[in-house]
Amino acid sequence: MAHFLGYVFIAAPKKSNSTYSLKGFWMEFKYEEPLTGFSDGLVVLKSYHEDFLERGKQLLQLAANIKQNGMNEDYANQCMEAYCHYSHATHLHHRDEEQSLFPLLLGSSVLVDGMIERLIMDHEEIEESWSKLAKQLSNPGTITNFDYFLHQATEFEKILREHLIREDEDFSPQVKKILTSEQIKQAGEKMAELRHLTV
C-alpha cells in the first residue's frame, strides 16, 4: 500500500462575516490497489479499468459540485483523495501494460503492433492531461476558476475513458487470442514484481 502525504483542509470561519476560508494541515493519504491478487494479468488490467471508469464519474461529479457550490472542506479533501489515487493508479496501470503485457505481444502481428503503438501514444496524452489536472487537485485551495477546473476534469476523464474503451473493445480480444494461460500468469507476476509484491 502506497502512502501519500497530503494537505487536508478544514473550513475556518472568517472574523469579518459568516463565510469560510480553507486552512489545512498535513496528513497521510493511502493508496489502495483496486484488486487483491496478481495471478492473472488480464484480471489486473480489467480491475483497473473498472476502477478508472467509476472514479471518472466521481471526479466529474466533484468538479460539477465545486462549480455549483464553491470549494469547501469536504470537496477539498475529495480533491486530495482523487489526486492520491490517480497519481499512483495511472502511472502503475501504464507501467503494467508497457512493461508486463506489451512485450509479450510485440511482433505477433502488424495489427497488434499498430494497436500497441497507438495505446502508448494514448498513455502520453493521458499523462499530459493528468499533469495539468494534478496541479489543481493537489492544492485545492488554489482552485478559484471553477469553470476551468471542470474543463480540465472533463478533458482528463474523456481521454482516459476513450482509451479504456479502445483497449476493452479492440485490443483485449486480440490479446486473449494470442496469449497462453501461462503468459497471462507471467504478466500478472511481473505486475506484482513492479509493486515489490509476491504472487
Image (spheres, grey):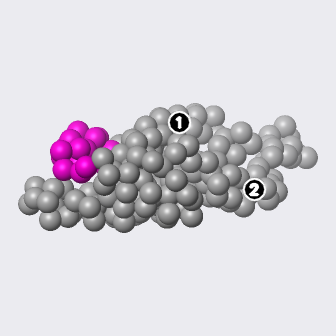
Residue at horizontal 36 percent and vertical 61 percent from the top: 100
Q: Residues within 10 Å of mark 1 (few under 14, many from 20)?
A: some
Residue, disc 1: 58
Residue at horizontal 44 percent and vertical 57 percent from the top: 189
Residue at horizontal 43 percent and vertical 61 percent from the top: 190
Q: Which mark is residue 110?
A: none
Q: In which quarter of the image is residue 138?
A: bottom right
Q: Is residue 92 left or right of residue 30?
A: left
Q: Is residue 143 left or right of residue 123?
A: right
Residue, disc 2: 28
Rendered view: 70 above or below 1 = above
Q: Quadrant of residue 127?
A: bottom left
The disc labelled 2 sits on which kind of residue?
A: Glu
**How far separated are the C-alphas under marks 1 and 2?**
21 Å
Main secondary-structure element of the magenta-colored stretch = helix
Q: Is residue 134 visible?
A: no
Q: How crowded is mark 2: few (under 14 residues within 10 Å), some or many (20 or more)?
A: few
**Closest to the observer: 148 or 95?**
95
Q: Is mark 2 on a helix, strand or loop?
A: strand
Q: Find out whether residue 24 is within the magenta segment.
A: no
Residue 45 in picture, x, y percent from top left:
39, 47
Residue 179 in picture, x, y percent from top left:
24, 51
**Closest to the observer: 30 or 42?**
42
Residue at horizontal 76 percent and vertical 50 percent from the top: 9
Residue 97 in picture, x, y percent from top left:
35, 58
- Tell me which segment is drawn in magenta: 163-180
Q: Is residue 66 left or right of residue 96?
A: right
Residue 75 in picture, x, y percent from top left:
66, 41
Q: Is residue 70 left or right of residue 49?
A: right
Rendered view: 42 above or below 95 = above
